[in-house]
Image (tube, grey):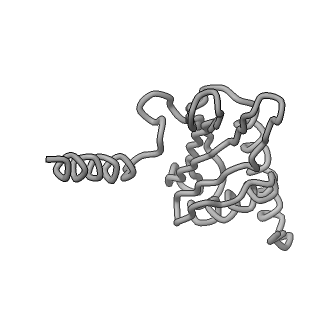
């Protein structure tokens, strides 16, 4: 009987890991911005914008980018925090793309006994990221060579 419980647990864990939409979509809507450029052009600019903000790309496929900030540790409180961003790019009106951005904060703490991920509705990172994305897109349209950090 215990083996059956193990199989049920493993199946649930596997299915929980299969996301058709970014985490937090059901509970927290994305911040959305319409930008000039094709989805392909915006996709490449989106990757570069994350890199310029010192985020590490954790998953990237045409139209979808996931990235994570550095882990910020607090010796005093015995915890760590990290921002995780998920981005989706969709074709909009001719010559434009719609960019959806979800941001969550992962907190790991000994007192909590694990890691918690909380989708964020408001955070200064949304404005910072969209400003950096606009800057990269402006540089691209001015035909400057891209900084491929």
Residue 49 relative to residue 14: left or right:
right
When the figure is inspected, residue 69 is found, relative to residue 105, above or below; the finding is below
The outermost residue toward the left is 1
> x and y percent of residue 79 in the render?
72, 34
When the figure is inspected, residue 28 is found, relative to residue 138, above or below; the finding is above
> x and y percent of residue 131 in the render?
78, 43
Kindly identify the residue that appears in the image at 75 percent across and 33 percent down. Answer: 78
Residue 71 relative to residue 15: left or right:
right
Q: Quadrant of the C terminus?
A: bottom right
Q: Nearer the viewer, residue 46 or 118?
A: 118
Residue 127 picture quarter: top right
Q: Nearer the viewer, residue 15 or 34?
A: 15
Q: Nearer the viewer, residue 136 or 38?
A: 136
Q: Nearer the viewer, residue 67 or 52?
A: 67
> x and y percent of residue 90 in the render?
50, 52
Residue 47 picture quarter: bottom right
Kindly identify the residue that appears in the image at 76 percent across and 59 percent down. Answer: 51
Kindly identify the residue that appears in the image at 83 percent across and 64 percent down. Answer: 142
Tell how many labels: 0
The outermost residue toward the front is 2
> x and y percent of residue 58 in the render?
61, 60
Kindly identify the residue that appears in the image at 76 percent across and 50 percent down. Answer: 70
């Amino acid at each position: 009987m215990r083996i059956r419980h193990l199989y049920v647990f493993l199946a649930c864990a596997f299915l929980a890991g299969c996301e058709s939409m970014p985490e937090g979509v059901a509970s927290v809507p994305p911040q959305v911005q319409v930008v000039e450029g094709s989805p392909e052009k915006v996709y490449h600019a989106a990757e570069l914008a994350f890199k310029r903000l010192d985020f590490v790309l954790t998953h990237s496929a045409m139209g979808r980018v996931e990235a994570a900030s550095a882990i910020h540790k607090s010796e005093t409180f015995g915890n760590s925090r990290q921002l995780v961003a998920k981005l989706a790019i969709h074709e909009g009106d001719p010559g434009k793309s719609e960019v959806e951005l979800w941001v969550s904060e992962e907190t790991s703490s000994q007192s909590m006994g694990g890691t918690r991920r909380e989708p964020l509705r408001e955070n200064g990172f949304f404005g910072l990221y969209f400003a950096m994305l606009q800057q990269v897109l402006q540089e691209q349209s001015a035909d400057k060579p891209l900084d491929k950090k």
